[in-house]
Amino acid sequence: PRRVLVHARFFADIDKKALRERVEKYLDNHFHLGKLTVLSNGDGGFGYDEESFHLMCWASHEHKHVRDDFHVNKKIRVRLSFCPKKFVDSMIRELRTLTSEKEIQERIPPWMDTARSYIREDSRERDLEQIEKLRAYLERNASCLKSLINLETKVDIRLGTAESNHRIYSYRMKRQGRSWGESGMNAMAGLITAKKNGELGKSLLYGIKNQYIQRIQEEVATVAVNIRERV
């Protein structure tokens, strides 16, 4: 059956440092991290690598990070698009069975040697470049390419779904070539996040209240300036 994300808490911000600090504060306030093993899962983009996640849960008893399967599989298929599908599928299946960085590092050379045997003469340089890029990617991320399924079984923890929960953001903010200003983008991401956290009403009230207070402050400041000018 499809895994379900339960008791989720969502965070969104265009400032990665501010976002990380908010997550760290939330974890510290709601969990006894010193007694917990924390699993993290990311695509490896800037701010979503192992070190970034570790900074959010540095006080935990143990932190285990894995690269998201969807993005790893996509990277392999794109880089080895010139290879037979049967070989690429078998490589991905084998990778999912490996349980240590050492095992992964040992399998990278044979995989790359096999890929070289499928190089096309009319695009030899391009294919070699793709193989080299994939080799570097696998070696660089070997420590977090261990299968999430195997890891979950070992520690009896379920991370739940992740990628599908991004869709509400991407569909609302990226489709049809939409573009945003910084303040508008942050506001929309905040509204989506509040809705997913079941706090939309409170967030809207808080936002309206703040806007009202700011408007009153601006009006008072304007009146004060006018008074000073008259005096």
Image: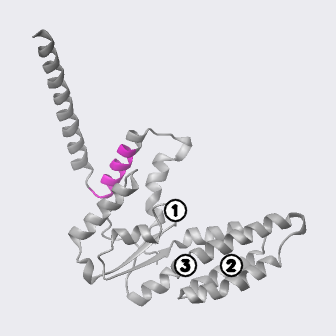
* CB within 8 Å, label 3 to label 1: no
Q: Is residue 159 above or below residue 14?
A: below
User: Residue 52, image x and y in percent?
Assistant: 42, 67
Q: Is residue 128 left or right of residue 191?
A: right
* Label 2 crowd bin: few (<14), some (14–19), many (20+), radius 10 Å: some
Dot 2 falls on a residue whose secondary structure is: helix
Residue at the extreme left: 231
Q: Quadrant of residue 187?
A: top left
Residue 198, disc = none
Q: Is residue 169 left or right of residue 60?
A: right
Image: magenta residue range = 186-198
- Tell me which secondary structure the magenta stretch mostly adopts: helix
Front position in the image: 206 or 24: 24
User: Residue 122, image x and y in percent?
Assistant: 90, 64
Residue 89, disc = 2
Q: Quadrant of the C terminus?
A: top left
Front position in the image: 231 or 105: 231
Dot 3 falls on a residue whose secondary structure is: loop
Q: Quadrant of residue 196?
A: bottom left
User: Residue 85, image x and y in percent?
Assistant: 74, 75
Disc 2 marks which amino acid? Answer: Asp
Dot 1 falls on a residue whose secondary structure is: loop
Residue at the extreme right: 121
Disc 1 marks which amino acid? Answer: Gly
Reading the image, the residue beneath label 3 is 145
Earlier along the polypeptide chain: callout 3 or callout 1? 1
**Residue 124 sits inside the magenta stretch:** no
The residue drawn where x is 31% and y is 60% is: 21
What separation in Å lies between label 2 and label 3 (alpha carbons)?
Answer: 16 Å
* Colouring mode (rainbow / by chain / secondary structure / one colour): one colour
Disc 3 marks which amino acid? Answer: Leu
Front position in the image: 67 or 74: 67
